């Protein structure tokens, strides 16, 4: 009887030992898995960061002869258009290449360029925010931006809004003279004119 009880005790002790060993192994595996996931995400982010920096470095080397600096999170653009609020004074009336004409007194619009590569345009009705890029020979491209969706009650203001937004999308170059900013399309036709 005593021998049987001793065997039972050894079996209980042995099974507890096995259970403890299984728990330790499972904890070890889960710890290794979580460390491996953290290391992988850290490696992925460093690869992404290094990929970004190498592509930025390549674009900087490629753009050495340009009159602007390449942008990344820490480099600010430099250009005479950056900083001031430019108020619209003239606008081409359509996108068919018509000459620019003075805008009506009830039409107000402006644009501001930031050193972080973003533009802020206040149209006759809506606000547009988007990216812009500068290139050699005063090249300027305004990327599609986010725009508010307010409606104009006045038909002339609504028409000026549509034209202003369409002309912004056509901009390919700029020229700054004294206190004025002129924006041109790809045929070098003046489509928007601003002043400080």
Image: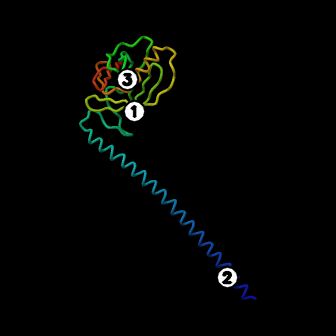
Marks 1 and 2 sit apart, C-alpha to C-alpha, by 75 Å
Image quarter of the C terminus: top left
Marks 2 and 3 sit apart, C-alpha to C-alpha, by 89 Å
Residue at x-position 67% and y-position 81%: 11
Image quarter of the N terminus: bottom right
Q: Which residue is mark 3?
A: 167
175 over 69 or under it: above or below:
above
**Colour scheme of the picture:** rainbow
Q: Check disc 1: other Cα within 10 Å, few if <14, some if 14-19, many if 20+.
A: some
Q: Position of residue 18 (x, y in %)?
A: 61, 75
Furthest residue to the top? 105
Task: Determine whether label 2 and label 3 are within 8 Å by CB.
Answer: no
Q: Nearer the viewer, residue 186 or 48?
A: 186
Q: Which residue is mark 2?
A: 10
Furthest residue to the right? 1
Q: Which residue is mark 1?
A: 131
Q: Secondary structure at mark 3?
A: helix
Q: Nearer the viewer, residue 13 or 185?
A: 185
- Tell me which label, 3 or 1, sits earlier in the chain: 1
Q: Position of residue 37 (x, y in %)?
A: 49, 57
- Tell me which label, 1 or 2, sits earlier in the chain: 2
Q: Check disc 2: other Cα within 10 Å, few if <14, some if 14-19, many if 20+.
A: few
Q: Position of residue 130 (x, y in %)?
A: 42, 31
Furthest residue to the front? 96
């Amino acid at each position: 009887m005593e021998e049987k009880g001793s065997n039972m005790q050894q079996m209980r002790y042995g099974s507890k030992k096995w259970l403890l060993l299984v728990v330790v192994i499972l904890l070890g595996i889960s710890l290794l898995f979580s460390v491996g996931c953290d290391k992988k995400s850290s490696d992925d982010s460093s690869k992404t960061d290094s990929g970004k920096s190498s592509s930025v470095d390549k674009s900087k080397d490629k753009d050495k002869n340009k009159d602007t600096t390449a942008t990344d999170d820490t480099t600010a653009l430099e250009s005479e258009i950056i900083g001031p609020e430019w108020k619209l004074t003239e606008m081409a009336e359509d996108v068919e290449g018509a000459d620019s004409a003075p805008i009506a007194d009830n039409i107000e619009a402006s644009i501001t360029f930031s050193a972080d590569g973003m533009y802020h345009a206040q149209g006759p009705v809506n606000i547009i925010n988007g990216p812009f890029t500068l290139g050699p020979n005063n090249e300027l491209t305004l990327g599609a931006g986010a725009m508010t969706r307010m409606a104009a009650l006045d038909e002339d203001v609504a028409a000026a809004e549509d034209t202003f937004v369409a002309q912004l999308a056509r901009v390919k170059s700029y020229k700054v003279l004294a206190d004025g900013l002129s924006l041109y399309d790809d045929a070098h036709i003046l489509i928007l004119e601003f002043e400080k």
